[in-house]
Amino acid sequence: MAGHSQFKNIMYRKGAQDAKRAKMFAKIAREIIVSVKSGGAEASSNPRLRAALASARAANMPKDNVDRAIKKASGGEDLSQYEEVRYEGYGIAGVAVIVEALTDNRNRTASEVRSTLSKNGGNLGETGSVSFCFERPGILHFDASKYNFDQVFEAAVNAGADNVETLDDIHEVTCPMENFASVRDSLIETLGDPREAKIIWKPLNTITVNEDQAKTLFKMIDTLEDNDDIQNVYTNVEISDEVLKKLG
C-alpha cells in the first residue's frame, strides 16, 4: 500500500496522540465552519457539512466542540475568510507532494509550506507541477469491526462505487470523483457514518525511498500536518517492508 494511506497508518502510531487529536479536532472544526458559511447550518441540505460532521463523529470529537463550531459560523462570530488552496512541489528524492489547505492568509501558508519543503530536501513548485502524477478518486472508509466485507460490498455496488478493498481495520470504498456525492449519501443512508469520506489524490506511480529518505519525509509531513492551515498531505512515495521494519 503506497502513498497517503501508508504514511497515515504509520503516523497514527507515532508521536503524542493527545496532541494529534487536538490538531485533528481543530482541522475538523475549521472544515465545519467553512461548510456552514458556504452552505448553511442544516446538514440535511448541506452535503459538505454532512461529510464534516461524519468526520467529527468518526474522530470522537466532543459534541460541544462541534456545536461551538456551527454556532461560531452561523452566528457570525467567526469573521475569518478561509479559502481552499492547493500547493504542489517535491520532497526529498523527487517525491511528489500535494498539500491542501484552508487558510485565511495564503501568503503566510505558502511561505510556511515552502520553508518546510526546503528544510527537508524539497522545493515548492507551480500549480500543476505534480498533480499530473495523481488521479482523483472518492474514497469512503468504514470500520471493519462494525461491518463485514459483504455488507459493504453489496451497499457499494448498489450505490455505484467502483471497488471495495479491506485495508487493515477498514473497508475502503472507491468511486469516481464525479459520483462521490451520490455514492457517499447512499452509503451513509445504508450503512451509517463512514470513518472518512473525501476526494483524495492517489498516485499513478510511486517512488521508492531508503530509510534515511523516509525519515526525512516523515519529518516533513509531520511538520506540514502540525500546521493548522493544512488539511491534507499527499505523496507518491513507496516504502519497502524492510525499511518499514527499521522505522518501527
Image (cartoon, rainbow, N blue to C red):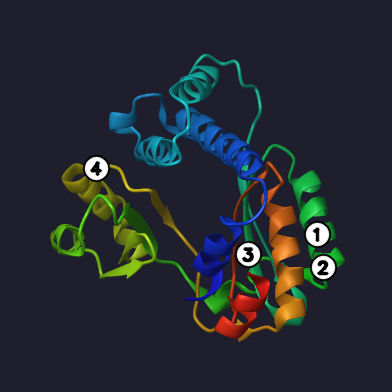
Q: Are marks 1 and 2 in contact (CB under 8 Å)?
A: yes
Q: Which residue corresponds to mark 1?
A: 116
Answer whether labels 4 and 3 touch (C-beta < 8 Å).
no
Q: Amino acid at mark 2?
A: Asn
Amino acid beneath label 1: Thr
Q: Are marks 1 and 3 in contact (CB under 8 Å)?
A: no
Is 57 situated left or right of 11 in this image? left
Q: Amino acid at mark 4?
A: Gly
Q: Label 4: state its secondary structure.
A: loop
Q: Earlier in the sequence, mark 2 or mark 4?
A: 2
Q: How many labels, in total? A: 4
| Residue ID for mark 4 | 192
Q: Nearer the viewer, mark 4 or mark 1?
A: 4
Earlier along the polypeptide chain: callout 4 or callout 1?
1
Q: Classify mark 1: helix, strand or loop.
A: helix
Mark in the foreground, 2 or 3: 2
Instruction: Please say if the residues under marks 2 and 3 sit with CB atoms less than 8 Å apart.
Output: no
- Gap between marks 2 and 3 measured at Cα: 15 Å
For marks 2 and 3, the one nearer the N-term is 3
Identify the residue position indicated by label 2 in the image. Answer: 120
Residue 66's place in the image compared with 211, above or below, is above
Q: Is residue 178 above or below residue 68?
A: below
Residue 89 placement, left or right of 156: right
Mark 4 to mark 1: distance in Å? Answer: 38 Å
Q: CA distance from mark 1 to mark 3?
A: 13 Å
